Amino acid sequence: MEQTKTAVQGVAALWEFYEEMKELVYAADADSMELVYMNRRARELYGIENPEEIRGKKCYEILAGSSFPCAACSRSRLQKGFFVEEIRYVPILKKRMSIKDTILEENGRRYFFEIAIDLGAWEQQDRDYEANEAMVNEGLRISLAAHTPDQCIAALLEYLGQSLGSERVYIFEEAGNHTCDNTYEWCASGVEPQKENLQGIPVEVVNMWYERFHRGENVLISNVEHLKDSDVQMYEYLKPQDIRSLAVSPLINEGKIIGFYGVDNPPERFLGNITTLFHILGHFIVALLHRRNHVRRLEELCFEDQLTGIGNRHAVQDYMKRINRQESIAIVYCDVMGLKKANDTLGHLEGDKLLIRASECMKKVFGDYMLFRVGGDEFLALCSGMTEQELEKRIELLKWEMRDKNAPMAIGSVWRVDDSESMNKLLTIADDRMYENKRMLYRTEEFKDIVRKQPGILCR
C-alpha cells in the first residue's frame, strides 16, 4: 500500500480508492476539463509512467489524443448521483469499452468522473460486417455531434485515422481545369502535413485510380514500391510523402466522381477488409461536403452584394475587425450619380446596369483591394498598405474608367499613415469629401453636358 501511495503522490485521497481497480478510472474538472486523475490501469494503457505527466492537460488531449474537445462528450447530460452508460469504441486504445460517466462533488469542486470497462480487444483481422457497422456508427455519431460541416469532417477524419491506425487521412476534391485539391487532412502525431503541397494536382496523375473508381472499386496499394515500374508518375507523387501503403475510395455524387478520400500507411491487415467501410463512409462524406457548400453559400449571401458580386455592408464590418491597423490605409467613397433618375424614367433594370458599370470601374481600378457596396448607390474601397501616391494615381484612373463606361460617380478619399484615428472617423471624412465632390460636379459644365446628352440615365 505504501508503494501505491508513493506512485500516486499528489493524487487526492478522493481517488485513492480507485487506484488498484482493474477498470479504467479518470476524473477531470467539470468546468475546465483539466484531467486531475487516472488510476494505475488507465495510466498503463495510455503509456503514462508518472501521474505528474497529466498535470495541466485537458482530458480530451490524453484520453482521445485530440487537440479539440470530444464532439460526443456526455458532460452536458450528466447529473450528480446518476450514471450515463454506453458502449463505445475508443480509437486511441483500439478497444471497445463499456463507459459509465457521472458528476462527483468534493470540497465545492465538480468533477467529470468516468469508469471504463474493457470489453476485449477488437481483433482487426476478423472485421466482419458487425464490426464494420459498429465502426461506421461510432464515426457518424462523433462527426454529427460537431457544430459546423468543417468540424464534422475534421472529427470524422481524426476518428478514421485513429481507428485504422493510419498516419494520414485526407480528402481531395476536383477543382476545375482538370485539377484536384487536397481540401482536408488529418495527420498522426509526428507525421508531416502534406496538404499545402497538394494543391492543383492534375487529374491525369490519378487516371489509373479513376479507371478503378468508374468500375466501383477502391484503390488498395500494399507496397508503393510496386508502382515504380507500373505507374511512374504516381510513384513520384507518393514516394516523397513517405507513403508506403494506402487505401483510396471515390467520392461520387449523382453518378459523377467529385473527388476521393483515403488513408496513408494503415496496418496491412486492414487493406483486405476496408472496402465496405470506405463505401459507406464515402456516401456520408459526400453529404457533409454538400452541407458545407450550402453553409458557405449562405455565408456568401450574408456578406455579398448579389447585384455586383462585391462585399455588402455586413462584409465591411467583418473586414474592419480584421484589418491590419499597423499599415497605412486609403479609403475611397463613391456615389453613383443619376441612379434615381434612371430608376424613375427608364426602370430599375437600367438603374441596375448603371450600378454594374460603376462596380466594374471600381473592380478594374481597386480590384486588388477590398470593395463593398454600402448603400443603394454608394461604393467603398478599403486599401490597406496603399501609399498616398498610389491612391492619387488610382483615383485618376478611376475617373478615366467612369468616362469610358459612362458611369459618373462622386469621389471622396482619405489616406493615413497609421491608426491614430478610428476607422469610423476616417470613413466619415471620406464620406463628407464625396458629398462635397458631388455638389461641385453638379455645377460643372462637363456634367451638365452629360445630362443634356443622356438625361434619362444621368440626371437626378
Image (cartoon, grey):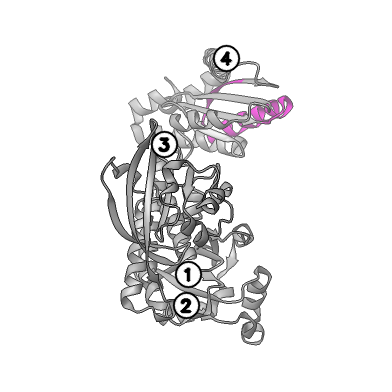
Q: Residue 279's spot in the image, x, y percent?
A: 38, 73
Dot placed on the residue nearer the N-terminal end, 3 or 1: 3
Tag 2 secondary structure: helix
Residue at 53% across / 27% down in the picture?
A: 408
Amino acid type of the residue tagged 3 in the rendering:
Asp
Examine the structure image and report whether residue 10 is included in the region drawn in magenta: no
Dot placed on the residue nearer the N-terminal end, 4 or 1: 1
User: Farthest residue toward the left?
Assistant: 82
Most common SS among magenta residues? helix
- Residue 195: image quadrant is bottom right
Q: Which disc number belongs to residue 270?
A: 2
Q: Which disc number belongs to residue 429?
A: 4
What is the distance, in whole Å, between disc 3 and disc 4 at their CAs? 48 Å
In the image, which is nearer the foreground, mark 3 or mark 1?
3
Amino acid type of the residue tagged 2 in the rendering:
Phe
Q: In the rendered view of the protein, which quadrant contains the C terminus? A: top left
Q: Residue 458's spot in the image, x, y percent?
A: 45, 25
In the image, which is nearer the foreground, mark 4 or mark 1?
1
Amino acid type of the residue tagged 4 in the rendering:
Ile
Dot placed on the residue nearer the N-terminal end, 1 or 2: 1
Range shown magenta = 385-413
- Whether label 1 touches label 2, CB < 8 Å: yes
What is the distance, in whole Å, between disc 4 and disc 1 at their CAs? 60 Å
